[in-house]
Image (cartoon, helix red, strand yellow):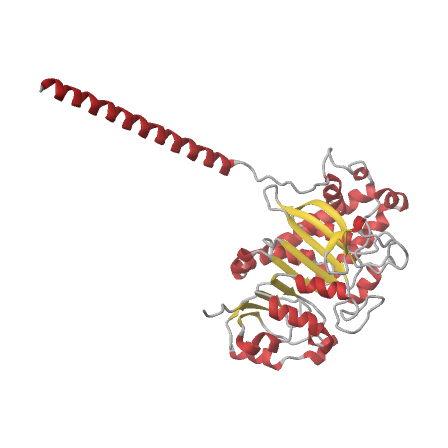
């Protein structure tokens, strides 16, 4: 009897030892897994996308920012004319950053919080090269698609610019920024001269200003590529395009990869120099009726947010129906001033919740035929929430006279 009890006791001890050993191993394994998970969390994000230090350094150089001793173009930084430009630009942008951009960023963090949480694709038609406001208001956009009538332009040739005189080049570059920095918008008539090589032959498009604005908004330019639009509305590298003769009718676009800060995500900016009207050609740019490649590209856009500012009331005209319908039907959010979509397009059908900012002061004299009584009534009667706009923007660019409307698509009822 005692032997039996002793054997049972020994068996129980062995079983307990095995259980304790197994539990210890499980605990160690769990701790190791947790340690590995924590280590993974601490690892920096790997960005395997293409990078070109030259284009990043060029963006800084055009913005008047030194890239330091390791900069690709540091030999040009000793040029007295560039040094003078950089000094002026640094003073100018310090003031803009403190007095303008900081106010806009604070407003954005409050008013556009949900918009920026959504990220996605930002569509900015009639933009010209105004990536300044696109990045300021929508820093979380994964992709930015900008379209204007102005050409994309070629890469600046610093050797050529240096030989011709940097002072002339940078004076011309500064001139292109006067209206956007002083009044918040590019003037179409001026752009027809300033971005077509008529002021300075080396500024034949929007590329230098896009790079400059990205550098001045603390973005790191990672890569540049010229892309081509195929017949079925796809984008491919321009080197893949086979039509290289004078009859080449291909639409090309600027593609810039960038990030905001060393830890920022890779974002993509596209700029197209195109005509968005349904049927009216413009200085060699075919209408959407003619350019089925562009029409197909637009139809493929998965738009999260549309931004419209100083858009010349183009979408009030009957021959912009394609783009107007695209924006209304596809956008989850729309931020615009009164020169964008007609106010009636935002209210009809009850598809959007609206928030009004600032005040409706009516159009400037140049666009006096585009008074919107329904918008005026909405502001005066507070049909929708009306909130402060602490800065000036758009054609009525003085603080207190500007307006912005935020439209948010209502959720579909299940």
Residue 49 placement (x, y as % from top left): 66, 42
Q: Residue at x 65, y 58 (%)?
A: 133
Residue 203 placement (x, y as % from top left): 83, 54
Quadrant housing residue 185 = bottom right
Using residue 75 as the reference point, say whether residue 3 is left or right of it: left
Give the mark count.
0
Quadrant housing residue 134 = bottom right
Residue 194 placement (x, y as % from top left): 82, 59
Residue 51 placement (x, y as % from top left): 70, 41
The quarter in which the N terminus is drawn is top left
Residue 214 position (above or below residue 385):
above
Task: Kindly tell me whether residue 231 is visible in this rendering.
Answer: yes
Of 107 and 40, the residue lying toward us: 40
Of 255 and 173, the residue lying toward us: 255
Residue 355 position (above or below residue 371):
above
Using residue 340 as the reference point, say whether residue 276 is left or right of it: right
Q: Residue at x 69, y 50 (%)?
A: 214
Q: Residue at x 45, y 69 (%)?
A: 414
Task: Kindly tell me whether residue 339 is visible in this rendering.
Answer: no
**Residue placed farthest to the top in the image?**
3
Of 269 and 231, the residue lying toward us: 231
**Residue placed farthest to the left in the image?**
1
Using residue 73 as the reference point, say whether residue 351 is left or right of it: left
């Amino acid at each position: 009897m005692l032997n039996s009890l002793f054997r049972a006791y020994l068996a129980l001890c062995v079983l307990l030892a095995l259980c304790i050993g197994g539990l210890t191993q499980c605990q160690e394994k769990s701790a190791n897994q947790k340690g590995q998970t924590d280590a993974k969390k601490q690892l920096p994000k790997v960005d395997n996308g293409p990078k070109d230090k030259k284009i990043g350094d060029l963006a800084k150089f055009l913005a008047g920012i030194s890239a330091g001793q390791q900069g690709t173009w540091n030999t040009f930084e000793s040029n007295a004319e560039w040094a003078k430009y950089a000094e002026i630009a640094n003073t100018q942008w310090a003031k803009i950053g403190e007095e303008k951009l900081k106010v806009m960023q604070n407003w954005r963090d409050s008013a556009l919080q949900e918009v920026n949480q959504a990220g996605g694709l930002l569509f900015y038609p009639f933009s010209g090269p105004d990536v300044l406001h696109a990045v300021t208001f929508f820093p979380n956009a994964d992709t930015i698609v900008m379209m204007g009538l102005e050409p994309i332009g070629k890469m600046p040739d610093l050797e050529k610019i240096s030989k011709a005189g940097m002072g002339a080049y940078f004076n011309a570059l500064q001139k292109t920024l006067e209206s956007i920095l002083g009044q918040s918008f590019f003037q179409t008539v001026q752009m027809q001269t300033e971005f077509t090589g008529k002021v300075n032959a080396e500024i034949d498009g929007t590329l230098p200003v896009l790079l400059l604005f990205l550098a001045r908004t603390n973005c790191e330019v990672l890569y540049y590529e010229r892309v081509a639009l195929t017949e079925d509305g796809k984008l491919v590298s321009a080197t893949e395009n086979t039509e290289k003769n004078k009859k080449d009718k291909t639409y090309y676009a600027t593609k810039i990869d960038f990030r905001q800060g060393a830890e920022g995500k890779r974002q993509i900016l596209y700029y197209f120099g195109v005509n968005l009207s349904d049927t009216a050609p413009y200085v060699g740019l075919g209408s959407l009726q003619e350019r089925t490649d562009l029409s197909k590209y637009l139809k493929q856009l998965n738009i999260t947010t549309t931004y419209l500012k100083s858009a010349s009331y183009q979408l009030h005209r009957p021959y912009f129906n394609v783009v107007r319908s695209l924006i209304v039907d596809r956008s989850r959010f729309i931020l615009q001033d009164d020169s964008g979509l007609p106010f009636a397009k935002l209210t009809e059908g009850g598809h959007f919740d609206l928030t009004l900012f600032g005040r409706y002061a009516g159009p400037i004299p140049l666009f006096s035929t585009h008074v919107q009584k329904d918008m005026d009534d909405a502001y005066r009667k507070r049909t929708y929430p009306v909130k402060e706009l602490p800065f000036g923007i758009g054609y009525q660019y003085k603080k207190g006279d500007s307006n912005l409307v935020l439209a948010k698509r209502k959720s579909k009822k299940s």
